[in-house]
Amino acid sequence: MAKMKSKRSGPVRLCAVESVAAAGHAAAPDISHLNTCIEDARQAALDGDPGPADPTDFDQLRGRLETARGKFPPLYRAEFVEPYIAKLNELGPAQFAQILIGDPRRESTAGLMLDMAHAILQRSDRFQIRASNAFQEVVGDLYDGFLSAEDRQGVNQPDNATTPPLVKWGNPDSGPYTWPVDATTSFGARAAVVNMPPSNARKGLLAWSALGHETGGHDILHADDGLQDQLAANIATNLSSLGGPLADYWSLRIDETASDVMGILNMGPAAGIGLIGYFRGLNKAFSGSAVLRNSGPANDPHPADIVRGYLAAEVVALLPFSQSAAWSKVIASETDKDVTTIVLAGKKITPAVARESAKRVATAIATTKVESLENHALADIQTWRDSDEKKVADVRVALTTAGELPEQGPSRIFATHIVAAAVIEGLANGADLAVVFERMVDILAKLHAKNPVWGPLFVRHPGNIRRDLAYVPHRRVVVEE
């Protein structure tokens, strides 16, 4: 990667990453400030800021939407804003009101309708615009990582066009969530909506590491016909010899399970350890206990926290970077600390069997080749390497100083590297957590300003804007006799 010297002002701190790299050794995983990050997540979860009020007046909403139309790039105007406006025009004020009355808790059609409106209006009104741009950049990068031409070398383009979601802030009691495109098509749109509580625009770093999960799931799995079913079949095959209900338990949760896996493939170990800290923070906020839940009810589409911790450890173990084993051990050790009695869909499971099942699920989803990807695996499209670790180290320097990112050469630094770096730096140096968070948001927002998806052209994935070279010149090497 081409580099330039960072421009810094004020005192410069030589962080652990620099000193270790200078010595020629890889730093051991340092999560000594995990509890600080958990407390940060707890405080963010308890922040009751609801964000902007719901736009429930039909005539006012229509007027605001018309004003907002011109604030969006061609892609989102065509695939989200204009179809949504057309659908509201079709509904009219009477049916708009009927939808609101029929869903007073805003958990179904009314919640969807209003959240889609928020996704448009908040950008138009520039609500939390710097954090919104940062949020949008992460979500777009996660989609690009699995669906762009740049990353799908040897794999056909997706069967179904998938536009990255729009983002919004609100509903703090519901935490991060997604309305997948399966839902938004009800209102004519062709992109999902991802929500985070407004507090996460200011704090709650570990929530950002969970975005890989929130933006995976339905849309990416459904972009390739048959992918979801083939991954579920792989799980059933890999778990068959364990007996009992585990094959069905994991297979029935393929959306949520695969989302965890894809988040880690795209963001590395930060997504795995971040998941554990984030869940502990949420559980501390809402139940008073900062431990992973050991129970996975049959009606919960998510696997139990405890087996998601083991799954994270096993996916990290599969990643081709030099510290994968060390990070896997750290994540598994943290998961082990919270084990009590594991009950999945009413069946008691031993910790050993729970971890073995997670190991087989990780292999089934991440590294098993599937027909819908032209006999490739998800890890063939996106995975975490030592080159990504080097980028994280570079970003950590920029996060803890006034420095800039290295020059954007062919091996670029992406939004997921920036979030991963912030999480790893926060875990190692919790005293600087607020500064790290602000720097993360600032760098992501600057990156978003250069994103061609948000420019004047109709671009679905930045990774599609690339040249296919017939010949790549090599630097001449002089061989001494």
Image (cartoon, rainbow, N blue to C red):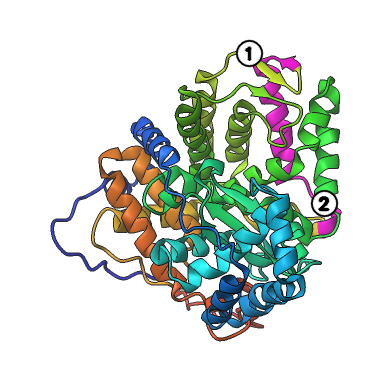
Is residue 237 visible to us here? yes
At a point 56% along the width and 43% down the height, the residue shown is: 174
Image position of 171 with respect to 85: above or below:
above
Image position of 94 with respect to 249: above or below:
below
| Extreme residue toward the left, this view | 10
| Extreme residue toward the bottom, this view | 456
Left or right: 190, with 62 as reference point: right
Which one is in front in this view, the residue at disc 2 or the one at disc 1?
1
Tell me the magenta residue range.
347-372
Image position of 268 with respect to 166: above or below:
above
Q: Which residue is mark 2?
A: 370
At a point 55% along the width and 47% down the height, the residue shown is: 176
Closest to the observer, 219 or 385? 219
Residue 355 lies within the magenta run: yes
State the image quarter where residue 261 is shown.
Answer: top right
Q: Which residue is mark 1?
A: 341
Q: Position of residue 88 (x, y in %)?
A: 70, 71
At a point 78% along the width and 30% down the height, the residue shown is: 249
